[in-house]
Image: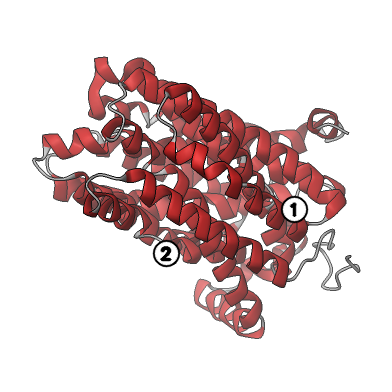
Amino acid sequence: MSILSDLRTLTPKQRNTVLASYLGWTLDAFDFFILVFVLKDVAAEFSTSVKTVSYAIALTLMMRPVGALVFGLAADRFGRRPVLMANVLFYSVMELLSGFAPSMTALLILRVLFGIAMGGEWGIGASLAMESIPPRLRGPVSGLLQTGYPTGYLIASVVFGLFFEQIGWRGMFILGAAPALLVLYIRRGVEESPVFLAHAEKRAEGIIAHAKDMARIGRKHIWLFLYSILLMAAFNAFSHGTQDLYPTFLREQHSFDAHSVGIIVVIGNIGAIIGGLTSGTLSERFGRRRMIATMALLALPVIPLWAYSSTPIFLAIGAFLIQIAVQGAWGIVPAHLNELSPNEVRGTFPGFAYQLGNLIVSLAAPLQAALAEGRGGDYSFALASVAASVAVVLALLATLGVEKRGVAFTTTTPPPVD
């Protein structure tokens, strides 16, 4: 069954929920990736280095756990839908203000605030979608939701390729305020999670009591939580290590113009979308862990083509193939983390684990930039060494972990898995 036929079995309200969650992550990623295309230009304007500007990426990643915790607790307390609307509005405003930053310090502060907003979106959107659909559709919908990330990257690359030379880096950030319009769609077309409504009486608790309850549940599942954090650290190193500095690699090491860079990144993200949709769907048949490990290992033979080719055509082919593997593994994450999550903290657990993993590898971009600069601008080595090592680690963690494919979100007893 294809993803389109799967989605046709959903009710109109369920489709609205899936679409809103997908668009929320797509537009959040679009706003994040705008910066990776303009590192060189921001550095020139503020008379600093690419490495220094790349700390804006690191700060965004570092603050995402804060957003995941704050917005996640709010979503478990007040509902997924209203908190998702507040989150989308917050990150849109921070993106807009980034376009008017008067100094490097101001831009760094705004990216810190953007990171808080970005950290909240994924967990809330994923839990809202996963709690609103039949269990048998979690794999396909998981793949669809996670392709929002490369879709956002793709949109950013198209905007960069078409408009950057006319509007500059500040104009790119101003365009990034457009996601605020998504709030109107969520308000009109999306219903609250039925799982949250089934436990609506818990909303009577005070926020402090609610936070204490979340801490108690967290202690009960501490080993599962720690495993999830390590798994997500590997996942985030896999994606950020292959994406964040790739446009800079193409501009600095190969001297490609904005149009060529945009085309190559678009092609890579088309591969990412294909990988996410395919792998998420196949995980319903072959299992979450098995598909994650398989896709991670498939990246290994592609790395030489992706990092060491010298022509635009071969670099584009390499980008296409490696992102099939990277986002193929990622396409399983929304379903896998939500299934691992205890019922009572599903608004908090997946997003918080995801973003703490992000925190662990938040310095990936500046470290990769430093590694490249230390070797005379050899971005190929920096990209390839990180991608290869992380692919192996991710495959091992997935293989050695746990799985609760198909678990019912309204009970605590999981069905048997392979």
Mark closer to the observer (1, 2): 1
Label 1, label 2: how far apart the Cα atoms are: 25 Å
Does residue 187 appear anywhere in the picture? no
Residue at the (36%, 18%) spot, across then down: 259
Position of 3 with respect to 382 (left or right) is right
Task: Tell which of 44 and 339 is nearer to you.
Answer: 44
Mark 2 element type: helix
Q: Is residue 176 left or right of residue 78?
A: left
Identified at 23% across, 50% down, the residue is 373
Place of residue 61 in the rendered image (x, y in percent of width and height, measured from the top left): 39, 56
Name the amino acid, label 1: Met
Can you give x and y, in whole percent of width and height, for residue 130 in the image? Answer: 73, 51
Q: Nearer the viewer, residue 296 or 236?
A: 296
Quick one: 394 or 372, which is closer to the camera? 372
| Mark 2, other Cα within 10 Å: few <14 / some 14–19 / many ≥20 | many
- Outermost residue, left side: 47
Mark sitting earlier along the chain (1/2): 1
Q: Is residue 160 above or below residue 64?
A: above
Quadrant location of residue 189? top right
The N terminus: image quadrant: top right
- Quadrant of residue 228 in the image? bottom right
Question: What residue type is disc 2 on?
Answer: Leu
Identify whether 322 is placed above or below 207: above
Quadrant (top left, top right, bottom left, bottom right) of the C terminus? bottom right
The residue shown at (55%, 69%) is: 229
Q: Determine the residue positioned at 26% across, 17% down.
A: 165
Depth order, front residue of 369/36: 369
Q: Provide the residue designation for mark 2.
A: 359
Name the mark on residue 291.
Answer: 1
